[in-house]
Image (tube, helix red, strand yellow):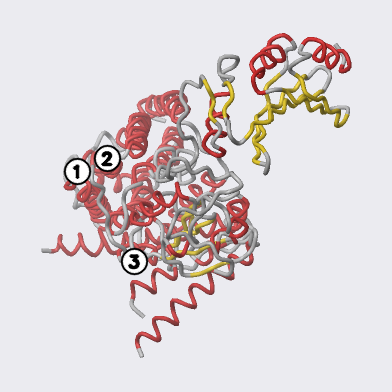
Amino acid sequence: MTREDILNDLSVRFKDDIIDVFDKSPKRVYVEIKPESIVKLVSYIFKDLGARFNIATGVDTRQHMEILYHFIIEDINLLVSLRVKLPKSKLEIDSLVSVFEAANWIEREIHEMLGINFNGHPDLRRLFLSDEWPEGVHPLRCDYKEWDKKAIRDRGV
Amino acid sequence: MSLKLKALLKSPWVFHLSTGSCNNCDIEILDCLTPRFDIERFGILLAGSIKHADVLLTTGSCNRQSVVRLKRLYEQVPKPCLVAAIGECALSRGMFIHSYNCPVPLDRIIPVDVYIPGCPPKPEAMIAGIVKLIEKVKAGQKRKKK
Amino acid sequence: MIYIFYLLAYGFLLTAVIGLLASWIDRKVTARVQYRTGPPVLQPLIDIVKLLGKETLIPRGASKLTFLTAPVIGLASVILVSTLLWVNNINSHNSFLGDLIVVLYLLTVPSISIIMGGFASGNPLASLGASREMKLILSYELPFVLAVLVPVIKSEFSLRLGEILSFQAQNGVVAGSLSGFLALVVAILCMQAKLALVPFDIPEAETEITSGPLIEYSGSGLAVYRLMKNMLLFVLPFFLIILFMGGLRYDGIHLLNGVLKYVGLMALITVIRNTNPRVRIDQAVRFFWGPMTVIAVIAVALALLGK
């Protein structure tokens, strides 16, 4: 299937889930979808199209939080990024562990760094932060403040 | 100068300790130990175990997980021991100065004797730094005697 | 009373001085081969003095007595062997029956002391290095004993070192005959393994990964081990010179001859050390139980036939 075929097929099949399709370059496509339909879309892309899961990234903008899931379809050299925008009042989304096992650790990392809750994740513990880090403090958020009284945070040591 | 310290300065065995670096300084340390720069003429050998070490070459900015391990390792080095901080990250956390995971610079955790700047420092700079360390220890002893 | 003098002066001091010089020669020649200058002359001595000045740390899981006495046992056996060899070299009537067997037994004790030190450390890496040393000992002892059997057969089945020396003084060195030469080649390679030098330094010198059995030693324990290894660098070639090349004689021009024999063996050790990679433990065992034993058996058969 070529690139145009895949994009037409997606927009026809998931008409009410896709909000926007952005063609950045011949090799990259950003597809923005609603948070409720992530599992449906990912199972289609992963199982039926045969794409490979690359990584998931998360960012905290001032209005909302975004998660991007990057999939690569290797035969036609295409990178499809699924963008999910979460409002700051309701930071949760379904977990992708039921579709493929590789989502386990990356969702743990997004949870401890940004504070997004993944429903249905079997084991949502801390991955990289040290044991003395307090609960509920997420470092990559916009409004992160230093909690450690003994840390030295000035320039010019 | 006491015989113990004189012998230590003439045959310092180095141990390479990385507390979470990007590995660039580690590659340059490895370059420094190759036959081209020949530091064996100063008596410097690479020690395999930390209990054989005299000079600790520390690289990397110390993040929270490695603070615990660094303290434990520093207790296991037989004293007298000298510490050299190599690279910008070990001096003052470098570009990670505002990072959430590097709270303090390295010399608040273990006592550092010589600082070698650079990102990464050239092997010639490291050799010059070790020579300055030896001069500093000799001068410190002379001042103590007076 | 004269024997205490022999023990201290010849057994310990002279062997230590020559051993440290030999270690320096080895490091300097290695440096020159790699196109660099090497360390100064007193460097091995300064290493040992520095190590004596550092504190000794004993790990919590180690058995203290074995940990601290293992290096001393190794050093004591090397001093004893070197005393025996010097006494026989000076005056070949001083030997007693079976002192060759005593020397062979005592020469296994340094390796066993490293194994003891490794297992007493309580560290899994040290146990791994010590078990590799055990496998290495099992492999090279067989061709070594077979190779030592050849001078015994040649000097009319006598087990005294003094008689082997005086036989060679009259009838020419053992290494001159075909069987003696083959046995000397086997013995040199087994000596390389006993000294734990490349290509057979699997157990001890993995300094790029761990330090083998010596990983937990610091301060005076390590100084004693290094002194033991440096003295072994003199004692083992001396043993081979006595058995195969007629010993060191000091009258007139023969002194130069003796020094050349020792320096020649040291040069051979350094050349083998610098031109070979390290082998795995199973390759070493296969090497010693395969070609080396076959050559040693051929040498013994030729010696029995009188060649």
**How far, Cα to Cα, is label 1 from label 3?**
26 Å
When the figure is inspected, residue C177 is found, relative to residue B31, above or below; the finding is: above
Q: Position of residue C285 (x, y in %)?
A: 42, 27
Circles 1 and 3 on the same chain: yes
**How far, Cα to Cα, is label 3 from label 2?**
27 Å
Q: Position of residue C175 (x, y in %)?
A: 43, 41
- The quadrant of the picture occupied by the N terminus of chain A is top right
User: Who is closer to the viewer here, C219 or B144?
Assistant: B144
Q: Secondary structure at mark 3?
A: helix
Near mark 2 (Cα within 10 A), the count class, few <14, some 14-19 or many ≥20, is some
**How far, Cα to Cα, is label 2 from label 1?**
8 Å
Q: Is disc 2 in contact with disc 1, using a CB cutoff of under 8 Å?
A: yes
When the figure is inspected, residue A38 is found, relative to residue C36, above or below; the finding is: above
Residue indicated by mark 2: C122
Residue indicated by mark 3: C49
Q: Which kind of residue does numbered mark 2 sit on?
A: Gly
Within the image, what quadrant is residue C108 found in? Answer: top left
Q: Which kind of residue does numbered mark 1 sit on?
A: Ser
For disc 1, the chain is C
Nearer the N terminus, badge 2 or badge 1? 1
Near mark 1 (Cα within 10 A), the count class, few <14, some 14-19 or many ≥20, is some
Q: Residue furthest front?
A: A89
The residue located at (66%, 23%) in the rendering is A35
Residue C63 tag number = 1
Circle 3 or circle 2, nearest the eye: 2
Instruction: Inspect this view and state whether residue B33 appears.
Output: yes
